[in-house]
Amino acid sequence: MVGENMDYEIPITGTDIWYYYICHREVWLMKHQIAPDQEDESLDLGRFISEMYYKRSTKELSIGNIVIDRIRQEDGQLVVGEVKKSSRYMKSAKMQLLYYLDHLRQMGIQAKGELLFPEERKKETVEWTEEAKQELERAIGHIQRIVRMSVPPKPKKIQFCAKCAYREYCWAEE
């Protein structure tokens, strides 16, 4: 991407929002199509959990550049669900789900959200707010700036690194 015209709007996904709140370097790597270790057990576990739980609700719905894990009707209200293996990264999960709710809202679809943590038997309701919209806009602007960088941000040791599928890429020289 170095040398390319980067004046255009870069499409942002819910996954970009998720990783933005965890690791800016990972956002850059993903947007530059540098694949993580596909043999990483964390990736497999996430896929397994998503497939094994919530079989009654509709699975994955793609709308433009977003992919919603679960969608259902409850008392006439559309409920969008995002399945996560852990509530450890609650802020990331909440902002990803708010991004989906905002995207739907822009299409004229009112919905509420649920974060689903099947391994913890936990569920958290998430609703769109104007404050969340403003935070999302700031995050999207920052993601756009990160992606336009010619090299990734320097790695920073965080608790997520130990289970990250990019850990060898970031820390191979240590």
Image (cartoon, rainbow, N blue to C red):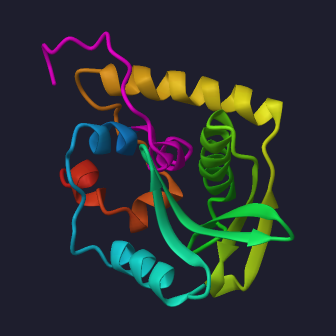
Q: Tell me the quarter of the picture where residue 145 sits.
A: top left
**Quick one: 80 or 157, which is closer to the camera?**
80
Tally of marks = 0
Question: Residue shown at 52%/21% (left/top)?
Answer: 141
Q: Determine the residue located farthest toward the right in the rendered image.
A: 75
Question: Residue shown at 40%/77% (left/top)?
Answer: 47
Q: Please tell me whether residue 87 belongs to the stretch shown in magenta.
A: no
Question: Residue shown at 30%/38% (left/top)?
Answer: 31
**Magenta: main secondary structure:** loop
Assign the N terminus to one quadrant of the image.
top left
Is the residue 25 above or below the residue 139 in the image?
A: below
Q: Please tell me whether residue 21 belongs to the stretch shown in magenta.
A: yes
Q: Is residue 75 left or right of residue 12?
A: right
Q: Picture coordinates of residue 98 (x, y %)?
A: 68, 46
Question: Residue shown at 15%/15% (left/top)?
Answer: 4
Question: Can residue 31 be spotted in the picture?
Answer: yes
Q: Is residue 84 left or right of residue 11?
A: right
Q: Picture coordinates of residue 166 (x, y %)?
A: 29, 56
**Quick one: 164 or 135, which is closer to the camera?**
135
Q: Picture coordinates of residue 71 (x, y %)?
A: 62, 67
Is the residue 137 above or below the residue 120 in the image?
A: above
Which stretch did the figure color magenta?
Answer: 1-24
